[in-house]
Amino acid sequence: MSASSPSHDHGTPETPVDAGAQALTAALHSSFAIVKVLMVLMVVAFLGSGFFQVGPAERAMILRFGKPVGEGQKALLGPGLHWSFPYPIDEYVRISITGIQKANSTVGWYATTPEQEQAGSEPPPGPSLNPAVDGYTITADANIIHSRATLFYRIEDPVRYIFGFVNASNVVQNALNNALVYASAIYKVDDILNRDKFGFQDAVRKRVIELLEKQNLGVLVENCQVTDSIPPRQLKDAFASVLKAQVTRSKLLDDARSYQNQVLSKAGADSESKINLAEYDRDRLVKDVSGQADRFASILPEYQRDPDLFRQQRLFETLGRVMTNAADKIFLPQRADGKPRELRLLLNREQKLASAPAPQP
């Protein structure tokens, strides 16, 4: 081969580039670029979803793979904006520290639906209670009642509230149910329904507090109310008759006590009046006797000096008082020899007036 002849490589011959392949390559490059951008955006969105806001009346805790980040009170996050790794790495839990939580117990109430509760209606009572759907409690005197209660509480220690139990709100609910059944078992039906409603409610509240403190749940009970306590609807008329009889009995007893009080008050007033009158007469008599004794003591020396003269003076004084208004006075002094005097008075009878003659016919 001459020097002027073209040289040829001994490698792979060049393959002409196809237009379709070039377009596919360009599309793949663009797709990979878009995927990269989308992945970056997804990563940013994934990390950005970790931001969360804690309200002023709240605290929050970050759980990383189920364990709190931090220990004790340090694990609590205050109000403001916070960040954590998104789920499933981290999970945050908000806790209301000033808000009032509420739990309702219907363990002793018959079956109703939320729609019926909102409408204020209730299903008709069946011929008997169905234990599968109807709740009730048993009283101390072996009666059956329906009762329900509401508990208001506040989370005082969020750490204990969250990590003490898997679901602390269920523990509160169970404590309220237990308290309602327990209080019903120690009170009689008449006390629960009529005589001692406040005592029954207080027994439920004390039992709830006792159970929650025993569980060390970290909550503070604000209020506990027994919202309803009624007899079984199947025995409504029978309980109404008993209540009517109790009202009648109470009225009769009140009337009897009122009459008793009136009689006792009148007897007391009469007794006091007679005692006062007797004391007045006693004082008057004592003063009169005392005055006579003083007078006797004052004239006793005169009598002792001359008894005869004293008797004559007293006699004349007495006769003077007795005969002050007498028309005729006759006084017979005692004879010197001590013999009695004889006084004879001739009293002429008044002459009868002559009767007038009867008129002649």
Image: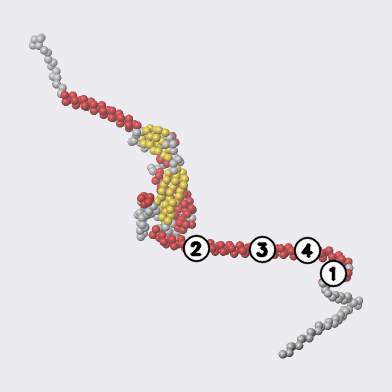
Give the residue furthest to the right: 336
Q: Secondary structure at mark 3?
A: helix
- Mark 4 falls on what kind of element? helix
Residue labelled with disc 3: 273
Q: Residue at x 90, y 77 (%)?
A: 335
| Amino acid type assigned to the residue bearing label 2 in the image | Arg
Residue 170's disc is none
Side of 153 relative to 335 (left or right): left
Front residue of 131 and 146: 146
Label 2: which secondary element? helix
| Badge nearest the viewer, 2 or 1 | 1
Q: CA distance from mark 1 to mark 3?
A: 41 Å
Q: Quadrant of residue 18?
A: top left
Q: Nearer the viewer, residue 70 or 354?
A: 354
Labels 1 and 3 touching (C-beta < 8 A): no
The residue carrying mark 2 is: 249
Dot 4 and dot 2 residues touching (CB under 8 Å): no
Mark 1 vs mark 3: give the one in front: 1
Q: Counting other residues with Cα less than 10 Å from the Cα at mark 2, is it few (<14), some (14-19), or many (20 or more)?
A: few
Q: Do the numbered discs 3 and 4 sit on residues whose CB atoms are within 8 Å? A: no
The image quarter containing residue 264 is: bottom right
Residue assigned mark 4: 290
Q: In the current view of this chain or complex, which residue is farthest to the front? A: 361
Amino acid found under the numbered disc labelled 4: Ser
Answer left or right for 333 relative to 10: right
Residue that badge 1 annotates: 317
